[in-house]
Amino acid sequence: MLLLWIVLTTFIAGVVGTGLGGILGAILGRDSNKVVSLLLSFAGGVMLAVVCFDLMQEALDPEHSGEPIPFWVVIIFIVIGYLIVNGLNVLIDKHTKKEVEHTKENHSKAHDNLDELIHSDHINFHKNDKKNLFIAGLIMALVIALHNLPEGMVIGASYAKDAGDIIGGTGLLVAIVIGVHNIPEGMAVSVPLIAGGMNKVKAVLITALSGLPTVIGAIAGYALGMISPLMLSICLSLASGAMLYVVFGELLPESILMWKSKLPALFLLIGLLVGFTLVLI
């Protein structure tokens, strides 16, 4: 029953979340800077609360066994989790940023508008070369599929630590937040595919399928986390590092640059407080 629930919620977070982004990309295109900025800030705040107030603390004393894991083990695997997701993002950058004009030496490595975040500026750069746009979309689908694997492990590890509570545990909350995070990623896949000439329905379907590895990652994260308290601690530490990179390396820089206002910071705080409240409930 629990495994089925994990598959269902992770499917919604990965496939439906990414697919929803694909649909928004097909409908809205590039006219949602402020909305996406606030969405990213809020998701970042909730993620930060889950990591700091739940996952990292649980990693130190998994299953409340009374035999705390040495803090240096937790720190080492947090750093490893951070570096793994950072490496996957370097791979994404390598295959996308080189194709567009904005990647000049003095340009911020974070995107400062929705065009760049979802790579719809490929449309302007490759106006007469739909083949390159189509290839760019396929590349984005593949690298985001790879990127979704460790995100799924985050969900699985979160469920493993609350194996007796499928509804009120952290796993469901993490799945929801990662689902929100996947929406802009889905837009990043569908926009260049559609601009490259692919049928919208087919583009959205491919976009949704790029979220499928999230389910595989969740099953792996849950299975590993159930082996022993030490393995659960390692999985939670890796999950914490992965989520910290997503927050500080992706969500917050993009959100603040996309809308230079005080509101993204406010929505970060709101997300943090919401996350803190949900962890305590």
Image: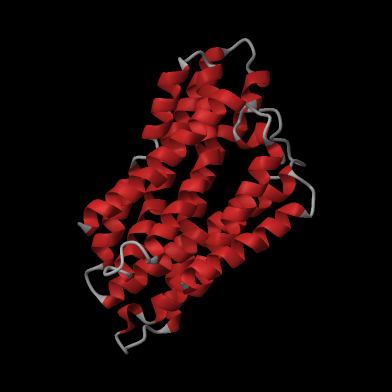
- Describe residue 156's horizontal placement relative to residue 101 as left or right: left
Q: Nearer the viewer, residue 74 or 43?
A: 43
Q: In which quarter of the image is the N terminus?
A: bottom left
Count of labels in the image: 0
**Figure check: 118 above or below 11:** above
In percent of the image, x 50 and y 59: which residue is there? 243
Q: Nearer the viewer, residue 69 or 272?
A: 272
In percent of the image, x 75 and y 53: which residue is there? 263
The image shows residue 187 at horizontal and vertical percentages of: 54, 33
**Figure check: 91 above or below 55:** above
In percent of the image, x 26 and y 70: which residue is there? 164
Residue 191 seen by the camera: no
- For the rendered model, the colour scheme is secondary structure
The image shows residue 93 at horizontal and vertical percentages of: 56, 40
Q: Which residue lies furthest to the bottom in this view?
A: 66
Quadrant of residue 3 in the image? Answer: bottom left
Q: Which residue lies furthest to the top in this view?
A: 128
- Describe residue 146's horizontal placement relative to residue 129 as left or right: left
The image shows residue 51 at horizontal and vertical percentages of: 50, 67
- Describe residue 244's horizontal placement relative to residue 253 as left or right: left
Residue 117 seen by the camera: yes
The image shows residue 120 at horizontal and vertical percentages of: 62, 27
Quadrant of residue 31 in the image? Answer: top right
In percent of the image, x 38 and y 66: which residue is there? 168
